[in-house]
Amino acid sequence: MSPSAEKKPLEGKNVVVIGTGIGGAAVSALLASQGAKPVVIERSAIVGGKAGAYDRRGCKMEVGIHIAPRGKKGPLGEIAKLTGANIDFVDMSPVVRLIYGENERKLPQKLASVKSAFNIISTIKPAFSEYGGLMRFSWLVWKSKSLDEASSYYGMSAHKLLTRYFTDPDMHAFMNYCSSIMFVMSTSEVSAAQFLVGLNNWFSDGATAYPKGGYGAIPQAYLDVCEQSGGSLKLKEKAEEIVVDDGKVVGVKTNKGFYPADIVVSNAGILKTVDLCGEGVFPEQYASKIRQLKDSHGAVVVKYALKKKLTSTPITIYIPKRFDLEGFTSSVQNKVVPDDGPLYIISPTVVDPDLAPEGQHILMACTGAPADMFDKDVNKKLLDLVEERMEALHPGLQENTLWKQRHGIDYFAAVGGRGFGEAIGLAQTYEQDGQRFSPRTPVNGLYVVGADTGAYGIGTELAALSSLTARDMILDDLGAK
């Protein structure tokens, strides 16, 4: 038998994947490349979950707001190379319009450049006395390439770490919003170790990018690989039970049938996965721990279709001067919406004009909110706040708007299926350092992918890394590595 005809390790194995978020879609492609023909179950009519996309009036609209911090250099690109998935990250510079109070500058794609550093400092304008601390902190970030290298900061908040280097409230406001972009939580909540590694990954690779075809093209490309390898995609089919017998998975029951399985990979979240199996099949301590951990915060989003292009950069970041993210979140939790708030804005058609009909343009803007904030009045006021600030940042927005959509926390709760509108999943807080779950569960043949089981990373890259880890564990458990 020639090497090319050698049997792959997963040939003949029944593999079922639940969910098509980045983790589920990626692991489907990775396992298909090892000889599996996965059955992929998706309860929605579209793939990708919060990283998916849908068509509306000729526009390809993203479900959520994303950016690939490392583009083709990160795990999303690595999985594409490993599987042959057709993902084209478009490099573009300048990539960010940074607005701090009344000041603004544009940042090049290579964020770890002299020009980028100069433009950030020129926008934030910290006190001169902060420059020494900034240099020392930058060196610490540069050295923190992995969690192992940042492990001495386990159990410490990013805010506590930052106070060793900065006293200037402008620097703290900027760092707080970096935390919000990466982890959808304030520096007072986020793990210092995760913060350092996240900044290192984002800035050092200098590859902040957006995929051609929109963000939804990423999970779709992975699933295309799966189907081309003989796998199948079951849309609008809901997993009702992961069937376990004597500590081992035997299949997945859906609202339409039963699929036998030697391996089940769930992208439904760790808690939902336990519920699908039944808590009794897991060790009591394992199930108890799952119910004690908390998720990230969420966001509300306004999406615009425009008849005129109003920006030249794919990303715009607006930070109110000396913005206090923790205070903002606390105020919203108390059902009081502040007069101003930060915005994270994505302009997909700047990168790929084909995402909208000729001459039209897409803008999407979000601001943070507690994941359990379902109060309709509070959501309305937050969405109104987003619109007011967008109109101030983009003159002519109102008269050039063809149509818009407003999505509150309830929308993202429905998309995510976890019961709340968290943006990422299991929160990367300092209190949960070392508490994140392995993709390998106590049930033989059952694995979990997604943000809950990603060791580190920013947003969708966190989920992508979990799929690479799960692939390695599955092969290792089969003795195929």
Image: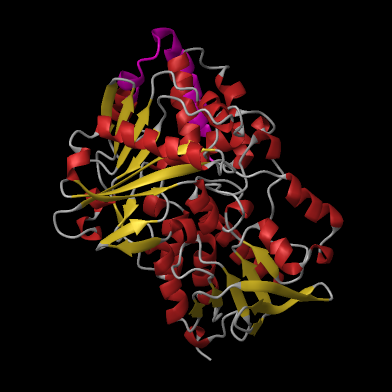
Q: Is 428 left or right of 84, judged from the image as shown? A: right
From what the image shows, is residue 76 above or below residue 366?
Answer: below
Question: Which quarter of the figure has residue 197?
Answer: top right
88 with respect to 166 (left or right): left
Which quadrant is home to the C terminus? bottom right
Tell me: 238 left or right of 314: right
Question: Could you tell me residue 24's position as x and y percent?
Answer: 54, 65
What residue is rendered at 40% in x and 43% in y?
Answer: 205
201 shown above or below 160? below
- In the image, the segment drawn in magenta is 120-145
In the figure, 218 relative to 462: above or below?
A: below
**x, y (%) of residue 400?**
18, 44
Residue 371: x and y, percent? 57, 43
Toward the viewer: 96 or 35?
A: 96
Q: Is residue 170 visible?
A: yes
Q: Splitting the image into 4 quarters, where does residue 395 fall?
A: top left
Would you say 307 lies left or right of 239 here? left
- Looking at the image, which is closer to me, 66 or 129? 66
The image quadrant that residue 114 belongs to is: top left
Residue 26 is a magenta residue:
no
Residue nearest the viewer, comparing 77 with 402: 402
Q: Position of residue 21 (x, y in %)?
A: 51, 61
131 in magenta: yes
